[in-house]
Image (cartoon, helix red, strand yellow):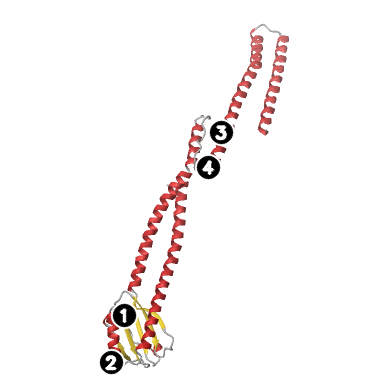
Amino acid sequence: MFRTVSSRLTVRFVLLLAAIFFIVFVLLFFSIREQLEIRMDTHLLVEAKEFDTVFLSSEREELQRIFTNEGDAEGAKRVFLRLFSSEGKLLAHSNLSEFATLPPLSESLVNVDSAPMLETIRLVGRNDAIRVITRQNRDGNIFQMGISLSDDELFINTLIRNLLLSMAILLISGGFLGWTTAKKAMAGVERIADTAEKIGRADLGVRVPVGEEGEEIERLVSRFNGMLERIEILVSELTEVSNNIAHDLRSPITRIRGVAETTLTSDSNPEDYKDMAGMVIEECDQLVEMINTMLAIAKAEAVG
């Protein structure tokens, strides 16, 4: 199957289409993932700044109530909030039942500067990633908030499935379109092959029908038909020349045979044999001259 030009063109077209789609897919995937990450980071930065501004003067008991309410409102499985002292002591937190494997605040974060720190973590027992912001407030305490990326991951997975499905549909339809286009383009070549096969059966009068595959195929068909016309003319001329040669050679050969037969069957003397030999030589000279003339004509036609 893959030895035909149509199949090879189709395979190359599908591979090119797959390469283009793959590049677009990769660029789109990373672009969307980057935008989702930027959106999440912006949301975390706003939440952390709002906490530092609104709840800075709240008492510890009030902060605990606020953290619990905020966590429950967002979803205990989706969000966690923690507040540490500058020494790393946990002061308040939201419901951490879904984040039981959260590690304590690391020493490297205890002395975090005023610039917020953003990171993505994964916890034992959870399949989703968590985007976490750690920020030092103006009072020196350290605020930490994490939001599950399950919604973003679900969106990305759905996007990947849809893109792969679209890619499969595109490659199948593109392969079918490429196959039909290649077959149509090669139809002219197939007509030429069929005509050549008929010529092989000594049918020099056939010609390749002109189709609508394109200018290149039409030009090929025109050149091939022109070549056939030239071949047909040459074969016709060759046949005519062969007939003429046969006719021209028959007469002197017939005369030579007649003289030789007459000489042999009659009571001939040495003079008769000499006459016969002279006649044969004369006829042979005419034959040589005739053959040389034909060769000169053939050579001139070949050069022309």
The residue identified by callout 4 is 217
Q: Nearer the viewer, mark 3 or mark 1?
A: 1
- Mark 1: which secondary structure? strand
Question: In the rendered image, is residue 252 in sight?
Answer: yes
The residue identified by callout 3 is 228
Question: In the rendered image, is residue 3 in sight?
Answer: no
Rendered location of residue 241, percent (x, y)? 62, 24
Please give the label number shown on residue 3. none
Category of crowding for the residue at label 4, using alpha-carbon neighbours closer than 10 angstroms: few (below 14), some (14–19), many (at least 20): some
Q: Nearer the viewer, mark 3 or mark 4?
A: 4
Does 208 sit left or right of 37 as displayed?
A: right
The residue identified by callout 2 is 61
Q: Gap between marks 3 and 1, in whole Å?
A: 83 Å
- Amino acid type, label 1: Val
Q: Is tag 3's residue or tag 4's residue first in the polypeptide sequence?
A: 4
Q: Gap between marks 1 and 4, in whole Å?
A: 67 Å
From the viewer's side, name the closer residue of 49 and 197.
49
Category of crowding for the residue at label 1, using alpha-carbon neighbours closer than 10 angstroms: few (below 14), some (14–19), many (at least 20): many
